[in-house]
Image (spheres, helix red, strand yellow):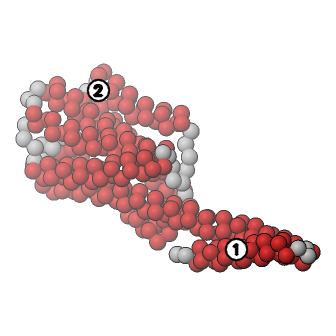
Amino acid sequence: MEMHVLAVFGLVVNLVARFIGAIVSFDMYTKTKEKRHFLQLIGWFFLFVSGLLPFGITLTQDLSVVSLIRISDVITLNIGLYLLITGLSLYFVTYPRNLVGGGLGIIIIVPILVFILLDVVIAINVSVFFQFVIILIFLALVYSNRKEIKIILQYSYGLIVLLTTFLVGYIIAYVYVITRVPNYSYGLYMSTDVIGIMAYYSAVAMVTLLGLMVFLHLEQGIFFKKKNILTDDYSHKIGNILQIIMGAGTTIKELSDSNEVNTTTDLILERSEEAGELIKKIREMD
């Protein structure tokens, strides 16, 4: 079987973007060990694998093997999409572990059962329905937590607006290829409909790239949020402590007649003033 050149190009573009996403998530996870980065890393991995599987269709003429590859492709994509979106949404919501595991089990087990008991086409359609559900849930989460997201992203908030727009565009493009492309088959790997292939893979590429950009800007937003907490909260607390030390030093100096004590007190007050100047500089940092 020969794959359409535009489908090959679309798959390669998405593989590169997903590989970059996996590298970035791996780097963040090794540094932070946070759950959201782990989920994103595994999500990017499964998305990458789902981009590789279609090439297996070109290596065999066995229809049973082709069916197995096709269903594995869409299930793997769903796993990656689910884990990646769950990891992204952990920036502004929290989930019970059982809920995440239960959702993952449903998107894996149900299509496999349908594939075994019924037909590969029905199983793929069920998986595509799950894709839409995952995307719509994410859109609902973004909308309901838009104020908190805006605080994190600040001037980059438009990126998540673009991501949600292209996610909707992805659904529209998918509906278009299902209803308008002759002899539609999942992924359009063997299709000859140029417009359908371009619409589908352009939407997928934009969603992938924007997802990566939103991830990077969320991390940047979290970094600056933590920085502001350090400069505003910690420097304020340290400043209060220094004031107490300086006050105590002044009192000791006034009450003491010992030259040695007064020399030590002067040193304490001098160093406290230096620390106070450093705190001012920290607060002035961008």
Considering every residue shown, the one lying at the far top of the view is 117
Q: Residues within 10 Å of mark 2 (few under 14, many from 20)?
A: some
In the rendered view, would you say 117 is above or below 189? above
Where is mark 2, residue-wise?
Answer: 115
Quarter of the rendering containing residue 51: top left
- Closer mark to the observer between disc 2 and disc 1: 1
Quarter of the rendering containing residue 139: bottom left
Q: Position of residue 33 (x, y in %)?
A: 48, 45
Q: Amino acid at mark 1?
A: Arg
In the rendered view, would you say 92 is above or below 46? below
Where is mark 1, residue-wise?
Answer: 271
What residue appears at the point 76 percent right and 67 percent down from the top-left corner?
241
In the rendered view, would you say 93 is above or below 129? below
Q: Would residue 110 appear left or right of 146 to someone viewing this image?
A: left
Q: Nearer the viewer, residue 150 or 281?
A: 281
What residue appears at the point 15 percent right and 35 percent down from the top-left corner?
56
Distance from label 2 to label 1 (Cα)? Answer: 74 Å
Q: Is residue 176 visible?
A: no
Query: Which type of secondary structure does the marked residue at label 2 adopt?
Result: helix
Q: Would residue 60 appear left or right of 217 to someone viewing this image?
A: left
Q: Amino acid at mark 2?
A: Phe
Q: Position of residue 25 (x, y in %)?
A: 38, 50
Q: Nearer the viewer, residue 14 or 242?
A: 242
Q: Nearer the viewer, residue 184 or 112?
A: 112
What residue appears at the point 54 percent right and 36 percent down from the top-left corner?
97
